[in-house]
Image: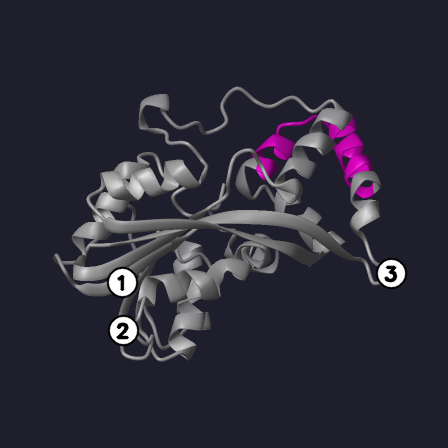
Amino acid sequence: MWAGQAETFNETVSRLCAHTAPALLSAAAGDRDLAGLRLLDVGTGSGTVAGLADEHGARVTAVDAESSMVELAAKRVPGAEVRQAILPELPFPEATFDAAVANFVINHVGDPAAAIAGMRRVVRPGGRIAVTIWPHPKPEAQRLWDEIFDAAGAVRPDDLPRLDPALDFRRDQAGLTALLAGAGLTGVTGTTISWTMRIDAGAWWSGPAAGIGLTGLILAAQDEPTALRVRQEYDRRTAPYRGPDGVLAVPTAALLATGTV
């Protein structure tokens, strides 16, 4: 769902994910300054978190599983070392970093507990790990897409990526903090970050229209008449959130958890 989509991702979905970057980095740094911190950004995407950390003087290493993301992140954040890697097999020795972050990455991995354990392995004792995920029940912005699909009569394909129930975790604050604690992190804390997403209506549509994310996979699976109804429902149901400049203002929320190695 992400292959070759770095530029489109950067102009669409990454804007939704960017809001949590400052809080994520603050949680990872703890009582330390970001300047000089050896930081690993896992699942960097187009480099939003890595770029912010680099601006604050961190010594940034960023990895992503998708090659076009790696290429774009390296261009956008020339001060970072950007490599291709897939959780949980991170290609670094133990205790390489002072901190590691994953911004909306644990949502997408096949084994969340193993992913946290892989991050823990490469962070030094006393270092910190911070992650964000989308919660369940879904916040308003994400729930809006379900309402659009349902109103248009869209059918969810049977082959959507699904996590093995035995490896899943509760997508609430208690579930996320338990995931980190289960990987051996101490002093685990969690919080909810709520904000109003502001994005051009056309940009928010163009991500799924390009096949990005689960929303994109669902949209791509529809026949032409259904896809047209989805677009019509999108326009109708986003209208109450749309300002005169075409920018949407939609409430959303994320979960942030952090712990010490």
C-alpha separation, residue under disc 2 versus residue under disc 3: 43 Å
Check disc 1 and report the residue beneath it.
99
Please name the amino acid that badge 1 sits on. Ala
Residue 234 on the magenta span: yes
Q: Quadrant of residue 91?
A: bottom left
Residue 114 on the magenta span: no
- Identity of the residue drawn at 29% across and 59% down: 100
**In the picture shown, does residue 159 fall above or below 237?**
above
Please name the amino acid that badge 3 sits on. Pro
Check disc 3 and report the residue beneath it.
244
Compare residues 76 and 17 and report the one nearer the observer.
17
Q: Quadrant of residue 161?
A: top left
Could you tell whether 181 is left or right of 160 in the image?
left
Q: Which residues are magenta?
A: 215-235
Q: Quadrant of residue 246?
A: bottom right
Residue 99 image point, x, y percent: 27, 62
Q: Residue furthest right?
A: 244
Residue 68 image point, x, y percent: 44, 56
- C-beta proximity under 8 Å, tags 1 and 3: no
Label 2: how many residues lie within 10 Å, few (<14), some (14-19) or many (20+)? many
Residue 247 image point, x, y percent: 77, 59
Closer mark to the observer between disc 1 and disc 3: 1
Please name the amino acid that badge 2 sits on. Leu
- Identity of the residue drawn at 65% across and 36% down: 143
The colouring scheme, among rainbow, by chain, secondary structure or one colour, is one colour
Of callouts 2 and 3, which one flags the residue occurring earlier in the amino acid sequence? Answer: 2
Q: Secondary structure at mark 3?
A: loop
Of callouts 1 and 3, which one flags the residue occurring earlier in the amino acid sequence? Answer: 1
C-alpha separation, residue under disc 1 versus residue under disc 2: 8 Å
User: Can residue 89 be seen from the camera position used here?
Assistant: no
Check disc 2 and report the residue beneath it.
37
